[in-house]
Amino acid sequence: MNFSLANDFRHALDRGELSPVFQPVRRLSDGVIAGAEALMRWTHAEHGRIEPAEFIPVSERTGSIHAPGAWMLEQALDSLAAWQRTGAGRSMFVAVNLSVIQLSKSDIVAQCAGVLNAHGIAPECLHLEVTETAPLDHPAAEEGIRALGAAGFRLAMDDFGAGFSSFTHLHRLPFDTLKIDRSFISGLRDNARSRAIVANAVRLAHDLDMTVVAEGVETEQQRAFLQEAGCDLAQGFLLGRPATAAALSRELGG
Ligand code: C2E
Ligand code: MG
Ligand code: MG
Ligand code: MG
């Protein structure tokens, strides 16, 4: 992303160019929606849609992620409060991605607790996703993760297996949920190694009393394999694309 776009991101929130979308996370045993992951969208006035893969890493480097990140938390809990009012969404969770930069801020627990209280939502309904590819060797981020765990929020290790020190992070940090990276799911059909890794990641997660989620499920074959392997939850285009909060409400029958 060029300098001018990086600079434009600083004003994207004020200009109303950001919006949240939500991708359903379904229980593999029965297909019921257990929760939803909040994902940030940026529609630039001139350049149109810009992908998070482009603007998130830059906004982390420049520190411009903080205000949009806080706003996403608000949006996510607003939407969750609405879903929980519909019968079908009563026990749903919402998952929000947090970058190490956000986790390193000393007020991260107060920030999460504040939005939660304002919405009257239980801490276990807020899942915080931390990407494992991000350098968790930021001591301040590690502290933030521990503090969030101690405060009762659910912590998910995102993109498990795609980073370099998955096991170190699992060993040291209080994660409740493991999200298996999409790259392993896309290999399930043709790659015996992918199948072995996924099946054993599910076992590992369960041995550690963690919930396991598969990301990027696109085919019925993949879904069937994951169900057979005992994977708890899944998300992917097969099970639901990211959509507006209102669209998800309609799906929940609210
Ligand atoms: P992630 O947290 O691993 O999110 C899952 C990504 O996979 C999303 O991409 C989603 O649209 C995409 N996806 C879901 N199902 C499928 C599928 O079946 N096939 C394929 N090919 N893709 C699928 P997205 O929205 O482009 O986000 C990319 C990454 O940007 C996220 O990866 C997350 O790390 C980051 N991100 C997005 N929103 C936020 C945010 O609000 N805050 C922070 N800090 N990071 C965010
Ligand atoms: Mg995520
Ligand atoms: Mg992920
Ligand atoms: Mg991913």
Image (spheres, rainbow, N blue to C red):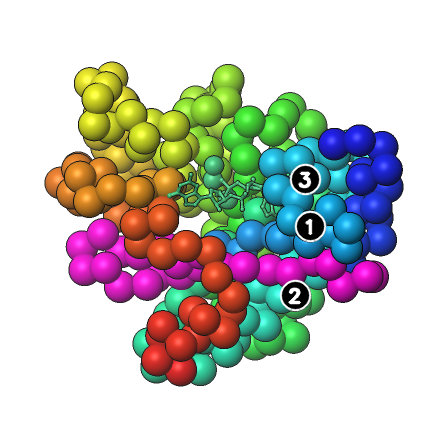
Q: Which residue is mark 2?
A: 74
Q: Residue furthest left?
A: 228
Q: Which residue is mark 3?
A: 56
Is 199 placed left or right of 1 in the picture? left
Q: What's the CA distance linking mark 3 and mark 2? A: 18 Å
Residue 250's tag is none
Q: Is mark 2 within 8 Å of ligand 1?
A: no
Q: Is mark 3 within 8 Å of ligand 1?
A: yes
Q: Which residue is mark 1?
A: 48
Range covered by the magenta-colored residues: 14-36
Instruction: Give amino acid for label 3.
Output: Ile
Q: Earlier in the sequence, mark 1 or mark 2?
A: 1
Q: What's the CA distance linking mark 1 and mark 2? A: 24 Å
Residue 209 visible in image: no
Instruction: Give amino acid for label 2.
Output: Glu
Quadrant of image for the C terminus: bottom left
**Position in image of residue 251 (x %, y %):** 36, 72
